[in-house]
Image: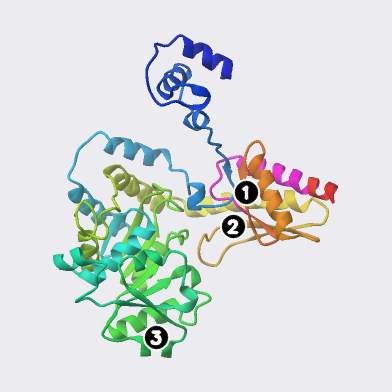
Amino acid sequence: MWSRRRFLENLSALPLVGGFIGAGGVPMVEAAGAAAAGGSRDYFKELGVKPFINAAGTYTAMTASLMPSEVMDAINYASKHYVMLEDLGEKVGERIAKLVKAEAAMVTSGAASALTLGTAGVLTGMDNQKMVDLPNLANMKSEVIIQKSHRFGYDHAVRNCGVKLVEVETRDELERAVNPQTAMMLFYNNNNPVGQIRDQEFVQLGKKHGVPTLNDAAADVPPVENLWKYTAMGFDLVAFSGGKGIRGPQSAGLLLGRKDLIAAARRNAPPNGNTVGRGMKVNKEEIVGMLAALELYVAKDHEKEGKEFDKRAETIRSSAASVPGVKAEVFVPEVANHVPHVRVTWEGGSRAAAAAIVNAMRDGEPSIAIRNEDAALVIGVWMMRNGEDKVVARRLKDSLERKNSAA
């Protein structure tokens, strides 16, 4: 095992090379050489960044998911060759469209980028001058209809294009809101259960009034069928995150849908300059990595994986429930992150007490990330690696027992 002493002893035998200064005043280039002498370089340790077991889920702040080795192989392959970015994007889009049974597809720099580029494509079509003008909407439609219950933290990605979001609640309000300035109708898939206008009716209204519909389904795989469910339902555009359940690059996403709108969205994206999407670059490595991840995901034995998730959830649930006064249950969210989770509550629980356990788990060894919803702890099992469910179960039980003893 590498100790700090052995690290410094090896470092002293290396030639002095200039470079960035790391923790403890050790030049980063020298640190790289020392680590290489004994195996893989531990970048996170050098930087003082603490890795953790992900028992929370595919949250951006927690760096979402881990990419399979096949995806990294694809990324490494792409890193060794030059290609024309537009050619690669087009060909990968064609391959992805076949995989997900869509008219067309493109890889974007995350689901938020898919929302911006999809909106831009709707607004500009193939008009180059309109692409340059965005977000100035002179000579373009300027309104996007959204249910009030569907307003969400990422609709700023749509507003990046300069549009005004028009809130409605009922079918009648939506139909009265449609006017010559209506460019698009935006749907947040996660909130389908709470909106008065459900997905199929929303699509039907879009078709009735000739208004394109965009569905943000960023976190809505699994199930795998969702990759083609919403385009088959009739949504003109659908956005997915690439780095969540699909386990592609975290900074990649997918925009699926109508061929003409995808073509226009692509024109608003890099490498094209002077567009609203110019900063939303996806490199060749991410594009090929996203394709590899999607191929793996579609071909995966989802039933087998689901049984493994169930097993992990029960391991954690039963361990937590063995603590006196603690209630633990397995649940599956209806839409987003549609996989088993464990919810843990206890007599006299509070938000502060739950947050204290979240912090204790994160600060311990090994560090474990869980989350709380008000007074309940929520543990997600699908981003764990094999065997980590047992570690989480043991640590969670210990934390709950310490809570009892301190009461």
Q: Position of residue 38 (x, y in %)?
A: 48, 17
Instruction: Say which amino acid is labelled 1.
Output: Arg
Badge 2 density bin: few <14, some 14–19, many ≥20, Cα 10 Å: many
Left or right of residue 379, residue 243 in this image = left
The secondary structure that dominates the magenta segment is helix
| Residue 257 appearing in the image | no
Write down the region rendered in magenta: 379-401
Residue at horizontal 33%, vertical 81%? 206
Secondary structure beneath dot 2 equals loop
Q: Which residue is mark 2?
A: 340
Answer whether residue 181 is magenta in the image: no
Identified by mark 2, the residue type is Pro
Q: Which mark is residue 312?
A: 1
What quarter of the picture does the N terminus occupy?
Answer: top right
Q: Nearer the viewer, residue 6 or 242?
A: 6
Q: Nearer the viewer, residue 332 or 131?
A: 131
Which residue does the image show at 49% across and 22% down from the upper left? 25
Q: Are marks 1 and 2 in contact (CB under 8 Å)?
A: yes
Per the model, the C-alpha gap separating discs 1 and 3 is 44 Å
* Residue 242: image location, x then y, percent: 39, 53
Task: Give residue 388's position: percent from left, percent from top.
Answer: 61, 41
Q: Which badge, 1 or 3, comes first in the chain's sequence?
A: 3
Residue at point 61% right, 39% down?
387
Looking at the image, is 301 positioned above or below residue 32?
Answer: below
Which residue is under mark 3?
Answer: 174
As displayed, is residue 197 above or below residue 105? below
Q: Earlier in the sequence, mark 2 or mark 3?
A: 3
First reached walking from the N terminus: tag 1 or tag 2: 1
| Residue 97, picture quadrant | bottom left
Label 3 sits on a secondary structure element that is helix
